[in-house]
Amino acid sequence: MVVNNIDKLAEDLERQELEAPNGVASSQVYEQLLAIYLYQNDLCNAKYLWKRIPQNIKASTPELANIWTVGQHMWKRDFPSIYKALNSVTWSETVAHIMKQVQDVVRSRAVDLISQAYSSITLDTVSAMTGLSPDICVPACAERGWKVEPDSCMVHPIRQIIEPVGQTSSEDQLYKLTDFVSFLEN
């Protein structure tokens, strides 16, 4: 699923929830919407959705509780528990693809966090934060250009330079505003 498709699906699911008879949507709507909020890292909306899901639907849908367990661990930023919760369940067809995307995006955020926050980190910590075994972590780190010391099991991430997208400096904005005002005056 592409992000645009997930965003559109989220809008459709939100509309279905709002237009549901008696204000109660089906359990599949709640499952998918909760999973999408986790994918989007929109933990506040996930929490509010969880609170407004009727108790009888929560009780009759164990998968909904499993999705929320992942959300609780995401809220705490407990990476090992996130992966444990994701991998301990065989997801139904309605949410399997979304939950796979959740796992991929959580791993991607963890890798970005490691590259921004650490100059050196143990291989075990990288493994815990990415949900990958140490055997898979070593080539994955090398692929990113990170230095791995096999004797000390230390990883030295390379900080990624994140370019601000579409942001201009205050001086550039002031120059453009001045240019525009002078154009209007002349």
Image (tube, rainbow, N blue to C red):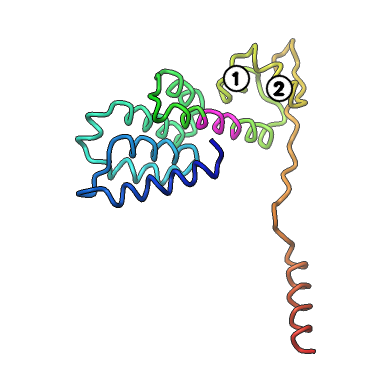
Q: Which mark is residue 127?
A: 1
The residue labelled by disc 2 is 141
Residue 103 shown in magenta: yes
Whole-percent x, y for residue 6 in the image: 49, 41
Of residues 49 and 13, the one drawn nearer to the viewer in this rendering: 13
Nearest the viewer among 12 and 87 is 12
175 vs 68: above or below: below
Q: Which mark is residue 164?
A: none
Image spot of residue 50 (x, y percent): 32, 40
Q: Nearer the viewer, residue 121 or 31?
A: 31
Residue 54 as seen in the image, left or right of residue 117: left
Q: Position of residue 64 (x, y in %)?
A: 32, 31
Is 34 left or right of 107, judged from the image as shown?
Answer: left
Image: magenta residue range: 101-109
| Residue 176: quadrant of the picture | bottom right
Q: Residue 15: x and y, percent?
A: 36, 50
